[in-house]
Image (cartoon, grey):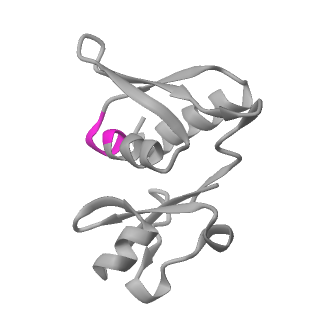
Amino acid sequence: MNYQIADALTRIKNAYLARHKEVIITKTKLGFSLVKILFASGFVNKPEFDKKTNSIRMGLRFIKRKPALTDMRIISKPSLRVYLSKKELPRVLGGLGTAIISTSGGLMTEKEARKKGLGGELICKVW
């Protein structure tokens, strides 16, 4: 897999659609940052790191039997990168969702990037 972050997002989305209780993704630097953001935003439960298999296992969060993560869209791809300035950062569903941005300061939500005055590559939108 050449684009690990898309693989991680797809695994999480498919696990939610199949109503699994947990999902395992390969541990990479971007995947680790992505999981931290999803955990801080309340979309997944606390992740566990397995050093033997170099993977991250996380519980999926359900609220009243409905997934906490309704949908996600991968925006930037290897064939078409999408870069935004700090003025162009999107608001997802009027602030109910989260956009994940890759900046010079690492992966962060669009709210954090706006506070720090950073633009960057729009990785995905999650709601």
**Magenta segment: does it hold 30?**
yes
Where is residue 98? Give x, y as percent: 54, 61
Q: Nearer the viewer, residue 78 or 68?
A: 68
Which quadrant holds the N terminus? top left
Q: Which residue sits at x=63%, y=27%?
A: 15
Q: Residue furthest bottom?
A: 87
Residue 120's x, y, as percent?
35, 73
Query: As rendered, which of 77 and 120 lies closer to the eye?
Result: 120
Q: Residue at x 63, y 37 (%)?
A: 13
Q: Magenta stretch mostly in which secondary structure?
A: helix
Quarter of the image for residue 5 reads top left
Q: Quadrant of residue 19?
A: top right
**Magenta span covers which residues?**
28-32
Identify the residue at the far right of this view. 65
x, y percent for residue 58? 46, 26
Residue at 76 percent of width and 33 percent of height: 64
Residue 43, given in percent of the width and then of the height, sits at 55, 43
Q: Is residue 91 above or below residue 69?
A: below
Residue toward you, 76 or 48: 48
Vertical arrangement, residue 5 with respect to residue 16, above or below: below
Q: Residue placed farthest to the front in the image?
A: 64
Residue 36, compared with residue 89, is above or below; it is above
Q: Is residue 76 left or right of residue 66?
A: left
Residue 119 appears in the figure? no
